[in-house]
């Protein structure tokens, strides 16, 4: 299979690290669990868009991020079983190097730049499966849709929209087992 996986909020915890860094920089006290909207600005109404999204471009953020539990092992297992894995990400160009070199390659050392696809439109990418926490990346795609649960997509009816909702990488491993991937 060709397996596509998002990076932020799926392979690594960018969203959580981002919320923490904004809180530290601007003295806010927003909790990750309370980020209910895809647009991070909605969770920080007292800050400007530049303050919120400017923090996403701060190199420091990429030293703080960690892997999602179980992700490195599951991706390795898929590759060892002969599947092709591509990280499909809509990362701003200013920080693509930091994210890939400092985070992805650090925790997923068996991946190289050949496994990275940067795009603002994931639906144009061909693959058998996409794992993503962004509903808009799954709707309309021709791949099997796995929605990685996050506070900002919790209220969405995944099953009713042809998606499989997963809470963690243990769940993802089960989905791949059911698909006969291993
Ligand atoms: Mg994401």
Image (cartoon, helix red, strand yellow):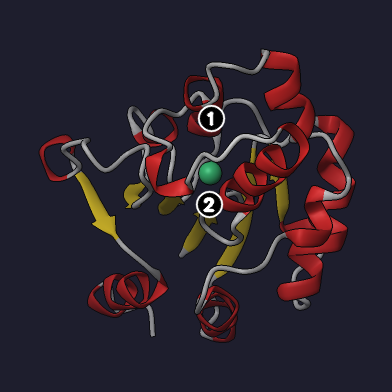
Query: Where is residue 21, by image quadrant?
Result: top right
Q: Nearer the viewer, residue 1 or 95?
A: 95
Is the distance from the Cβ of mark 2 to the nearest ligand 1 atom less than 8 Å?
A: yes
The residue tagged 2 is 9
Residue at mark 1 = 124
Q: Secondary structure at mark 1?
A: helix
Q: Is residue 26 above or below residue 158?
A: above
Point out residue 7 in the picture as x, y percentages from the top left corner: 61, 52
Q: Position of residue 18 (x, y in %)?
A: 66, 44
112, above or below 28, in the image: below
Q: Secondary structure at mark 2?
A: loop
Location of residue 144 in the rendering, given as x and y in whole percent from the top left corner? 32, 50
Q: Is residue 69 left or right of residue 164?
A: right
Q: Choose between 131 and 94: the one closer to the eye.
A: 94
User: From this viewpoint, is residue 54 visible?
Assistant: yes
The quadrant where residue 138 appears: top left
Residue at (33% x, 73% y) in the render: 176
Marks 1/2: CA distance? Answer: 21 Å
């Amino acid at each position: 299979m060709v397996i596509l996986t998002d990076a932020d909020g799926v392979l690594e915890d960018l969203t959580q690290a981002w919320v923490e860094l904004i809180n530290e920089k601007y003295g806010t006290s927003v909790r990750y669990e309370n980020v209910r909207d895809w647009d991070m600005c909605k969770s920080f109404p007292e800050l400007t868009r530049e303050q919120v999204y400017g923090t996403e471009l701060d190199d420091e953020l990429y030293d703080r991020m960690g892997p999602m539990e179980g992700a490195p092992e599951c991706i390795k297992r898929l590759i060892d079983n002969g599947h092709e894995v591509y990280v499909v990400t809509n990362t701003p160009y200013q920080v693509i190097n930091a994210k890939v070199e400092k985070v992805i390659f650090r925790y997923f050392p068996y991946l190289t730049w050949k496994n990275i696809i940067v795009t603002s439109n994931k639906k144009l990418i061909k693959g058998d499966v996409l794992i993503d926490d962004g509903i808009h990346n799954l709707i309309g795609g021709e791949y099997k849709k796995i929605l990685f649960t996050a506070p900002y997509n919790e209220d969405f009816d995944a099953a009713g929209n042809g998606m499989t909702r997963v809470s963690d990488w243990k769940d993802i491993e089960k989905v791949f087992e059911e698909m006969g991937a291993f």
